[in-house]
Image (cartoon, rainbow, N blue to C red):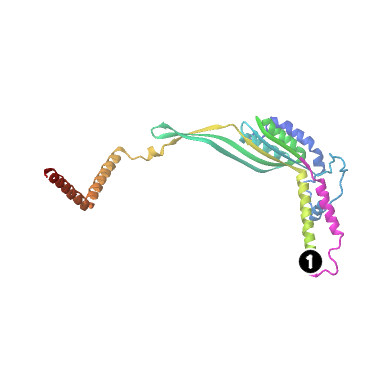
Amino acid sequence: MRNAVPLWVLPALTLAACSSAGYEKNAPSGAETVSAEAVTAAADSTSFAADIASLNSASRKRVRTADVSCRVPDVFKASQALERTAKSLDGIVVESKQTNEVSQEKYLPYSSDSLRHVRMYHTVANLTLRVPAAAMDSVVQVLTQQATYIDYRTLKDQDKTLDYLGNSLRNKTVQHTAKADRNTSSVDAASYNQQNADNTIDRQLSNLAILDEANYATITVAMVQPARADVVVEVNPEAITRAGFGTEMKTAVITGTDILRNILLFFVSIWPFILLAVAGWILVKRFRKTSVQA
């Protein structure tokens, strides 16, 4: 089948399914709707299902990212394999870009009316994937199994638990604090309340972003394949557009006639200078002759 996942990807998918079992238990079902109040409550929640004193606690807001640059035998096949793997793990392909970079280009004679166009190029692909955090290692493993050379591989695991908790505590503090003093003018009170509301929304959005990044890891991939040659036989534009021998002969005769006419017209246009030059030459010749006789 054209869209089937390669056999060497199956062990990685099995490992991802096992490692993400805990994540799927806690994740809401697709048919379940989430209200705006529930989203706001999640952004301001300070309660944790487990103790965050443990470094590997499930309650910690850990953001995982991966950045890999490598060489693969075929960029197109490797990109397709990674895209299928991400989608099979309920992830998404944020960006997938593929380009050909030409390093050398030449035109060589091939026949009387054609040229051989030779281009040396290497294909480059850049992908950005988002997959469940528990499945990130499996996707990276799928990539490294295809790589023949790895420029670099960077895995990051950032703990943003304190950032999340700090935003939640600030929002709860604002809710239990008096918004304005009695002596404050209505304009100042309105500005103060609006600023507090804006800050609260910003912190809620920041917490929602942390939750999203903690649930879904971001994988950035840069791939390149060995240089290849693209050889194409093309029509020689100079040969195909050149006129026939008879036409070129006729054109040459007309061109020569035009050149001769232009030369004659040039000398006719400067006849006064020619006349002065001839008169000067005669005078100089007579002067020399008189000087010799004397």
User: Residue placed at 18% from the left, 49% from the top?
Assistant: 280
x, y percent for residue 87: 70, 40
Observer-nearest of 15 and 31: 15
User: Residue placed at 25% from the left, 48% from the top?
Assistant: 262
Q: Which residues are magenta?
A: 157-186
x, y percent for residue 217: 74, 42
- Residue furthest to the front: 294
- In the image: residue 243, left or right of residue 92: left
**Residue 166 on the magenta segment:** yes
Amino acid carrying mark 1 in the image = Ala
Q: Within the image, what quadrant is residue 51 found in?
A: top right
Q: Is residue 14 above or below residue 62?
A: above
- In the image: residue 143, left or right of residue 174: left
Q: Is residue 162 above or below residue 19?
A: below
Location of the N terminus by quadrant is top right
Count of residue discs: 1
Observer-nearest of 13 and 155: 155
x, y percent for residue 272: 21, 53
Q: Secondary structure at mark 1?
A: helix
Residue carrying label 1: 190
